[in-house]
Image (cartoon, grey):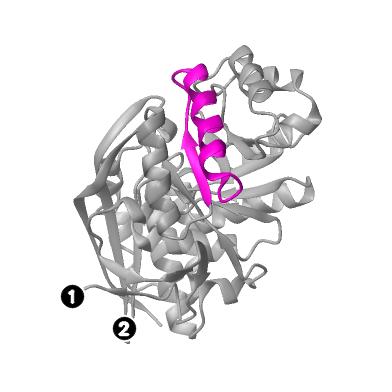
Amino acid sequence: MKIVAVRSYLKNMALTKPYTIAYNTFTDVSLAFLEVELENGIIGYGSGSPAEEVVGETTQQTAINLKTDFVLNFVGKDIRHFQQIIFETILQFPHLPGTQAAIDIALHDAFGKFIGISVTEFYGQKIKSLPTSVTIGIKNVEETLTEAQGYKALGFKILKVKTGLDVAEDIERVVKLKEQFGNHFKIRVDANQGYTILDLKQFIQATKGKDLELIEQPMPVGAEKDLLTLSWAERKLIAADESLKNPQAALMLASNEKPFGIYNIKLMKCGGLVGALGIANIAYNAAIDLFWGCNDESIISITAALHVAYACPNTKYIDLDGSFDLAEDLVKGGFEIVDGAMQINHPPGFGFTLLP
């Protein structure tokens, strides 16, 4: 089945509300979209939204790359060779994971629709359902508690609290959340590289007994050796995010003493499902748990991440709330949320449908 058309476009989309992390505040997001059409009318959809401060690629660069002759020359290629096309894409656009991801996702969607099964069925579904965390940006204590109350009303059970600007306030926010909500919420925190090793040790000590699930990327990239001063019991709860961009980094971090016990995989860091599976396989053999995350993204790429996450036996955590932040999108469906847990729909491909 031949590819007969390739179309791409860039859209700027408002967020439902601004949010702040350790190094930025966001009010909207740019998303690059790709359509791959087959001769029988099937269309596969992909989306790219890389974080420039993490991977060095802007969404504008992604959009430009999707209009190059390399991508336009997909026309005439057979969708059954989609994995070879993805391999060639990685060679053509090295270190540009947003571009890779948009192409990878669109090709997977088109191929799944062509063969008539969901992508997670193609790879073999290992996980049926997991609860996703929902994210609270850096706010004061009162605002944090108010937002958490809203998430409780919506049925969510896990919070990811952004931290990293003021360790004392971070501790207070976690303590107050536990005081007000007790065991209703499990709590994860994400410092986005904002801590020193002394900050981190202070935070860990002060939140003992608060039953934190994990601490995501507490220290800057390059400071991984400092984490080795923590006990393994403490490091098992530390998740690599910005330190983990591709399978090569996964292999390095899995060698000898492991600074992280959890790998955070984002399709926009590793270039799509193929790169994600490369990281996941390394983690599986190193007995490292998987934690699937996202940027502010379309349902298109969120659903793609969910499909590959549920195809990996060592998936333990998901944080796939990125499409919740968008005030608009191009598609709907792809997954259902039941009591805060994400479940995959099983139409062919990724299962979302284009909005009118």
The quadrant of the rendering that contains the N terminus is bottom left
Residue toward you, 286 or 318? 318
The amino acid on which the numbered mark 1 sits, given as a three-letter code, is Pro
Residue toward you, 102 or 76? 102
The secondary structure type at the circle numbered 2 is loop
Relative to 334, is 161 above or below? above
Q: Which region of the structure is painted magenta?
A: 158-186
Q: Which residue is mark 2?
A: 39
Q: Can residue 303 be seen from the camera position used here?
A: yes
What distance separates the C-alpha of mark 1 from that of mark 2? 22 Å
Residue that lies at the very extreme toward the top in this rendered image? 198
Q: Is residue 326 left or right of residue 313?
A: left
The quadrant of the rendering that contains the C terminus is bottom left
The secondary structure type at the circle numbered 1 is loop
Q: Position of residue 242 (x, y in %)?
A: 52, 33
Q: Position of residue 78 (x, y in %)?
A: 43, 76
Q: Quadrant of residue 179?
A: top right
Relative to 337, is 67 above or below? above
